[in-house]
Every structure is written in structure tokens, then in C-alpha cells.
Image: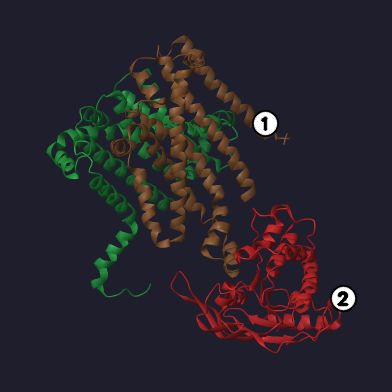
Chain colours: A green, B red, C brown
Amino acid sequence: MRPEPATPNRPLRMLKTALSRYWGVIAVLVIWQAWVSISGVNQIVLPQPVDVFRDLVAEPGIYLRNAGQTLLLAALGLILGMLLGTVIAVLAWSSTLLSGILTPLGLVFSSVPVVALIPVIARIMGYDLKTVLAIVVIISFFPAFVFTSAGLKTLPPGSSDLFRVLGASRWTRFTRLVLPSAVPSWMIAFRLAAPPAVLSAMLAEFLMGTSGLGYLFRSAASGFQTERALGTSVVATVISVLCFTFALWAERAVLRKWN
Amino acid sequence: MTDASSPVAHLSPVRPATETAIDLDHIGKSFRMENGRELVAIDEVSLKIGKGEFVALLGPSGCGKSTILRLVAALEAPSRGRVVVEGREPEDLSRAHRLGVAFQDHALLPWLTISANVALPFQLAGRSVDRKRVEELIRLVGLAGFEQARPRQLSGGMRQRASIARSLVLHPDVLLLDEPFGALDAVTRRQMNVELQRIWTDERITTLLVTHSVEEALFLADRVVVMSGRPGRVIKTIEVPFERPRQPAIMRSAEFHDLVDELTLALEPEEAA
Amino acid sequence: MIALSQERWRGIVLGAFGVLLFLGLWQLIGVNRWAGLTWPPLTDVLTFLFNPSRRALFGRAMSASFSMIALGYVTGAAIGIVLAGIAHLVHPLRPGLDRLASVVHAIPAIALAPLFIVMLSREMTGMAIAALNVFFVIYVATTSGLVASTAAHRDLFQVFGASPVKRLMRLDLPAALPAIVSGLKYAVPAAFIGAILGEWFGSSRGLGLLMVSAMQNFQIPLLWSAVLIASTASLLVFAAMSVVEHLVYRRYR
């Protein structure tokens, strides 16, 4: 390490680091502000940030209640979807027949816009909360299945059926060798699946108009409450960024322990 | 520009060098390791290479001989001392596109044909491609007929031939060869040595060859410089007495074998004791 | 070419069996009404879809959606490649562009929709969200691809005195091509998702609008047809990109 220059420069250095990391984000915000100022967009169409903030502070209950519900459904759906994807991936790994059938199907589904299935699922299951949950489970299932399968493939495939693998003597082999080798891929799947889980929960709420952030957004937008709609955007962004950051942190923490 | 393009067909003196082409003046190179300790790769090396001279750097792996080549190529900067090539900083030479280089890794671009790979230095120098020169070199290294092949379709030896052709295509002032045949089998390697000797005798470019093969150094070079391992130092220098062009038969001569023994002894003093 | 290994054949047969099994289950559930009236048999959907009287309806929706998807795909890919190139050439800009890409990726499309509706238009919102989705995938693929060249190649270019632009054009970009093409493949479904989402927020045409209105009006075969069209189109483009990817990998690696 090189000796650091005198301490008075420290705030300056921190500013420089922050600037080098966030100049892109700042530039976008500046361009946006400049565009709004120059083009003089009507305030009803696009309110000032201050108005959005005022609405957020004035009605925290509405935001918190809906955000809490969305977050809960997204988290629960993500966990269930990941579990389901992992179990199916292990089943596929344990039998060459199953993996031969399921792997191409997994590829097909990861090459289509799965989010477009939301209206179909909503229609089949009906407009309620368990449908939102089911949608998040299905959306989270695919990355979990695809990545866990890829992680398990680094090992020789299970030549026999699952029960032989899970037989008393094999249980240790499975937990000591098979599962650990899939953990890094599993964490990647978790990080990749977290933002879509939140997004798909909100989209389901938006389309069905039940409750939660998506519903709040829809009712605000249709009632021309632009501050409320943008406030919802802000809350949604914060939740999404938090989830992504948490997933990233979890991935790094687990991988550090793993290696 | 040199006149190296005109082949010197006749027998010329073994040591025509009078002018210094490469001057390593008390150079040293240290690397800082991850644990904070300093690793001295080259302790103190002084070496002058004359214009048109072929010098082989011989040494065990990790003795810093490749580092010396990288200093001349301006791929690294010395920690101590000074490197002067053709009276200038090494960087000036590479920026003027007057260096030729071939590594142990052939470093051919997989998406280009052999012909396009050999022509690459023209494009990197921003010059129009001299088709005749490219063809001539491809023929010279024995790859005629493979112009449109891709590197992956060729054997290791053929790839190295293309790599040698590429290093020579611009008529460089200085040729740097870093174990160019290190990954080849013994038979192919000897064959490549014979051909490189033939091509070099025509072009007479100032050359620095890094190798760990005693026979290769003796057969190709005018002068062999032996380095010791960690930290790298010059421990022995011998002038090679064989006249050019050299025939493979000299490798079977008693004189050649004596020199091989002498150099091997210098490389492995502890085994002799 | 024809002499595929036994393992390949097995994979193809099992894969085809899996897809047929899926389609068969779809049909079976629909015919027996196991999932209610909202799950139509595959044959009903296909009959509905290929009925000549609906050609105009689907044609309009497809041309609206596909043009937005294509525009968003090309725009997003171009911005992604150019910004990754800038980040590669001008190193101090790299951390800022990396952060911008990940922040853009973390903002849910639903939050950006009102902005795009105001700044562009309802019709262009799908294009913009598709472009953002594609941008992220391509930016990440390109920045990682641009450092894929080997150390020996970089040394070679330096010794031959290549300028930074020459190095980018003749070494870094060709070496990045496999990664970029893989990115372009994975960006296909992302572009479809973006455009369809955008249409959900009040576009007056397109497959996305068809899905939402069919869902709300219980037009079950129409709903499934719209989803089937979008999925099949995405799958076909994805498959085409896989072929391109295969060719590029063969030549550039």
C-alpha cells in the first residue's frame, strides 16, 4: 500500500469516488430535469418531485400497507418458486430420462416472455391474492430450475433413480457433494430472480386490481392522481433496489463462505 | 528503414556487428508480491546487442529471461537502469511499428485466415497490405497452399510458422522471439530451427531469442548469454563459432557437442559438483 | 453432420418427447376441463388463431408489437454496445456506467412507465422498456466480452504498435463477439417482455393490449392466442439467434 496523503483530502477523495461511481446516474437525472424545465411540461402531467415527496409523507399508511403486502407476496413466492425449481432440478439430475425431458422444456420457457403468462394464470386461478403468489412462484421457478440444473451438471449425472441416490448410504454423498456444488449457481438464480419476483407481483396486482402496490399505482393512474402514481413508482423502485441489493449481498456472503 | 529486405545470399562474416542496436544498461526489475514482499526478477544485467546480431538468452525457467525480452518490447518498464533500442526508448520503436515478435503462444487471431494473420501488422501500422510480401513470407515459412486456412485447422508447428512469418512481415529493425518453439515436440522443433536459421540468414535482423534449449541457442545464435535463476544475472557468455548458413550437420560435430556440454554445465553447476 | 452421436439422438428424442408431453397435457386438461373453462384445449386455441376472419386483428397487433420490439431491441443493443465500448476505451468512466446500468436494471418497469408515457407516448412506452431491458443485458455481455482477449494477443498488439482504436476494432471487439451474440440471444425474451409490459400500461394497440382486454372480457381463446403468438415469436427469434451464436462461436473462438 502506498502511504495515503494528508487527511484533509479525505472528504474530497470520497466525493471523487462517489462521482466516479454515480456520474452516470447523476447525468440522467440532470438531463431529465433539464428536459422538464426546457420543454415546460404541464405540472398535472408531470408533477414536481416536491409534490411527490409531500404525498409520500402525508399518507405513509397507504404506501406502507400496500408495499408490505406486495413485498410479502414477492418474498413468499420467491422462496416457494426457488424451492420448487430446486426440487425439480434435483429430480431431473437424478434421472437421465427426466432430465432429457425437462431440460429442453426449461430452455423453451426461458426463451419466451414468461411475464406474458400473467393474464392467463390470472384468468385460470381468479382475481385474488393466491393468484399473485402463484404468479411469483411460477416466475421464480424458471431461473431456479435452470441454474440449479446447470450447477448440478458440474457433477457426473445421477445414473440411477433418486431413491438410490437418497438411500441411507448415499444421503451423505448427496448432502456433502451434490448440493454444495449447486450452491453457487443457486445464489446466482436467487439474485436474478429477486427483481422479477417483485416486478411480477406488482404486475399481477396491476392487472387484476386487487390490492398492493400495483393496485395503488393503477387506481392512482386511472384517477389522474399523478403524485400518487409517481410516489408508488418511488416506493416500488426502493423495494426493488433493496431486494436486489439484499440478493447481491447474500450471494457474496454465501460464496465467500463457500470457497 | 533497413535494407534487410534484400536477401544477402553470400557468406558473410559471423560477426558483422559494429553498431549497438540494443543496449541494456545495468537494468534491474523487481515485482511486488501480494504479500507485500519484493521479488527481484532481474538483479543487474548489462548487455549490448549489435546491429544484425542474433543473441540467444539461455536460462532455467523463472530466471527473468522473458522479462528482459518484455523490457526490450516495452511491455514492461525496468525498475532500475535503462533500455535503449536503436538509440531510442523501446516504446518509440513499437509505436513506429519497427518491432517483430513471436511468443510461445502463437497468438494468431482465430477469426482470421493465415494470410490475414500474417498481414495483420500492416493493418496495425496503418499501412496498405503488401500482398507480395505476405505471399513471399508464407512461402518462405513453408505454408504455401494454407493461405485461406484458419489457425485451428493447422498443427502446432504450422501455427508457429505463421507466427514467425507475421513477426517478419514488416521488415522489423528488431526481432524478439520468446520461446517460439517451446510448445512443439522435439522433432518439429529441430525442423523449425533449421528453417528459422535459413530465413534469418536471408534477412539478418537484430534478434533476441529467449529459450531454455541449449541446442536451439547454439544452432541459431551468434552469441549465447547464460542467465542464472532468481535473481536473474548473466553468468556466462560464449561466441558461437559456426559460419552461416549453418547446415543441420553441425549439430553432430564434436565442437557443437563440446559447446553444448559447456553451456549445460553453466546452466546446472550444482549437478556437476 | 448426419452422424450425430447416440447421446445427441437420445437428447433430441427425449426433448421432442418432453415438448409433445407438454402440448398433450395442455390439450388433455383443456378437453376435460380440469382447470375450468379458462383453460382451452390447444386445438381450440389453434382453430381460433388460424381462423381467416381474425387475420386482420392479429396482423395489426403483431405488426404494432413486433415493430416496437424490433425498434427497442436494436436501440437497446446499440446503446449497450456503444456505452460498453466507451467504458472500455475511457477507463475512468467505467464505474459510473456500470452503476447506471445496474440502477436502470433495478428500477421496476412499472415505475418507469408513467415517465415514458409522459416523455414519449403511450405507444412508444413498450419500445422504451424493451430498449432498457435489452440495454442492460447487452451492456453486461459486452463489457465482460471486451476483456476476453488473451494476454498474448494484447502483448502482440502492443508490440506491433496498435493504437487503442485499432486494438478495439481488430482485437477486443472480435474477441467480444461471442459474448455479445450470447447477450443478443438472451435479450430476445427481455425485449418481448418489455414491449408487452409497456402495452399493458395503456397502449391502444399490440399483443399486450389484446392480452389485457381479452383477460378482462373473458375472451379466453383470444387471450391464449395472443400469449401463444408472443411466445412462439420469441422462441423462433431465440432459436435463430442460437444458430447465429453457434456459427460465431465456431469462427471466433
Residue C201 image label: none
Disc 1 secondary structure class: helix
Specify whether residue A92 is in view: no
Q: Quadrant of the N terminus of chain C?
A: top right
Separation (CA) of disc 1 from disc 2: 56 Å
Chain letter belonging to callout 1? C
Q: Residue furthest top?
A: C32
Query: In the drawing, does residue C26 fall left or right of residue A227?
Result: right
Specify whether residue A226 is in view: yes
User: Within 10 Å of the Cα at label 2, are there few (<14), some (14-19), or many (20+) other Cα atoms?
Assistant: few
Chain letter belonging to callout 2? B
Residue pointed to by mark 2: B249
Q: Residue furthest front?
A: A39
Question: Quadrant location of residue A144?
Answer: top left
* Residue toward you, A97 or B118: B118
Query: In the drawing, does residue C10 fall left or right of residue A180?
Result: right
Up-down relation of residue B148 to residue C65 (above or below): below
- Tell whether label 2 touches label 1 (CB within 8 Å): no
Residue A147: x and y in percent read 48, 39
Residue at image position (83%, 76%) is B251
Residue pointed to by mark 1: C9
Residue B71: x and y in percent read 57, 76
Residue at image position (64%, 48%) is C251
Residue A221: x and y in percent read 24, 30
Q: Which amino acid type is marked by label 1?
A: Trp
Residue at image position (44%, 23%) is C60
